[in-house]
Image (cartoon, rainbow, N blue to C red):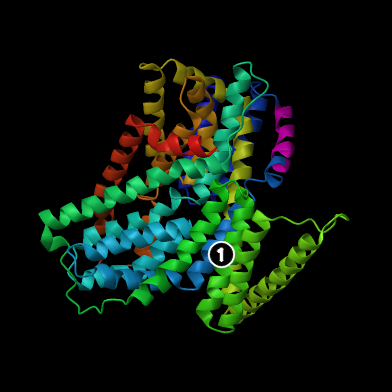
Amino acid sequence: MSAYLDLMMFGALIVAVLSGFPVAFAIAGVAVLFAYLGWALGVMDISLLGAFGQRVFGLISNQVLIAIPLFVLMGALLEKSRIAEDLLDTMGRAFGQLRGGLGISVVLVGALLAASTGIVGATVVAMGMIALPTMLRNGYDTRMASGIVCTAGTLGQIIPPSTLLIILADVMSNAYQQAQYEQGKFTVETLSVGQFFAAALVPGLLLVALYLVYILLRGLVRPQDMPPAAEELQRPSRSEILSAIVPPVLLIFAVLGSILAGIATPTEAAAVGAIGALLMAGVRIGQWRYLILTGACALIALALAAGMFPVRLQRNDLGLIALIAGGIYILLATVGFAGIAAALRGAMRARMVQDALTSTMTMTAMIFATILAAGMFSLVFIGLGGEERVAHWLQNLPGGATGALLVTMLVVFVMGFFLDFVEISVIVLPLVTPTLILLGHDPIWLGIILAINLQTSFLTPPFGFSLFYLRGVAPASVTTGDIYRGVMPFILLQAIGVALIWALPALATWLPARMF
């Protein structure tokens, strides 16, 4: 029995998670139990757990993961300010008279919200409450409408910025370094979050294109499933379209553009996104709107001017032009700060900030607690010999590197039926990705196809999170079976997306290679 403790440990983990006990405590409890069991049977050196302190310190000092709470805060502020509702209403009226037009608008809004919030739950709930009843009133097939809403909401996991990509970038970078050490390279290369954001951009848009093509074809083949809007929808004016679309697009450019251009780190860009979301919320409330807009323009002007003509006021050899520029920068910063203060005051009066901070703390605590518990689990699993077993198993599978990756993708897909993407990312992937990289797979390409696979875990019953989110807000006429059946075609489309990226690796590797 002692020779198979690592396999028994993994089985016990799945049972503990499915029991309904809080995930982080279930993972840590299984780890502690099997650590002492391995020590008692003489197959594990218990002193290995002394490295857990280093893992905790490494987590809390990880500059990459600091971006997670900031991106979550950005998404929470956008959710509380109801910007998603404006987008859905405007796009629905713009496309509603087309066959499948409401479905197209939901997918496009899902893509925009994915690039500006990255939070699946908020997007699915917002669209489930606003778009789903509208689609059903206009004669959409219940399963089709449910599938569109669930799937569009999950785009936040593959279109950057996303929590999944940040965690995956950290996992893949560590795996890449470990693989290089095992190859005897001690001057190792690292991977950045920016590279994974760039790599995910084209595959994310590819998935959006696949969904749109499917909706259009389904509308042609089965027009009764997605008829044009029966309600008399007033087409939005150009100013309405611009006012709904421009703010989130500007936020996307500010966050993603600064990362991909190398101007800011992901953490700095996440802070910019959080401030941008706060300013947008302040404008939405309407109090001190002109002060907030002026402050936003001042901050944009400051960023552009300081980038083109930097001034270091601490130097004592500055010329007259530099001093004048410095004074202008101070004035712009002051106006920008006044705009932020006005937006913050308005958002706090509307209780947007308090609610957004509560959501942020809850989600961040869940993610970091799971990562900490996974650190304990992986230490014990390694101590019981599980890492060597996994590496030996992958290296000896038929089909070589391709066979090993196929089996890994299948295992990750099946685990997505039962486990959350965070648990799979921080428990399973660190065990298999170093070996897959050693077998010759490009780490960035590998990370992207795994990301799409993990995104699918939000849609796969019985524990797909998007399914639960939609079930909680869907009308009573929509059954759980309707939701489950509705997502099946979109799971197949995601499999097609993975196959396309597998066959054409440049879809994931070209952009990061050009930009980094």
Residue annotated with mark 1: 359
Residue 301, quarter of the rendered image: bottom right
- Coordinates of residue 415 in the picture (x, y in percent): 41, 39
Q: What residue is shown at x 38% (from left), y 76% (from top)?
A: 239
Query: Is any part of residue 87 visible from this angle?
Result: yes
Residue drawn at x 57%, y 66% as measured from the top left? 276
**Which region is colored magenta?**
46-57
Where residue 483 sits in the image (x, y, percent)? 28, 57
What residue sits 57% from the left and 28% below the top? Answer: 176
Dominant secondary structure (helix, strand or loop) of the stretch shown in magenta: helix
Relative vertical location of residue 123 with respect to residue 388 in this rendering, above or below: below
Which corner quadrant holds the C terminus? top right
Q: Secondary structure at mark 1?
A: helix
Left or right? Give the position of 253 relative to 146. Answer: right
Q: In this rendering, would 475 be left or right of 121? A: left
x and y percentages locating residue 508 in the rendered image: 42, 37
Does residue 460 show up?
A: no
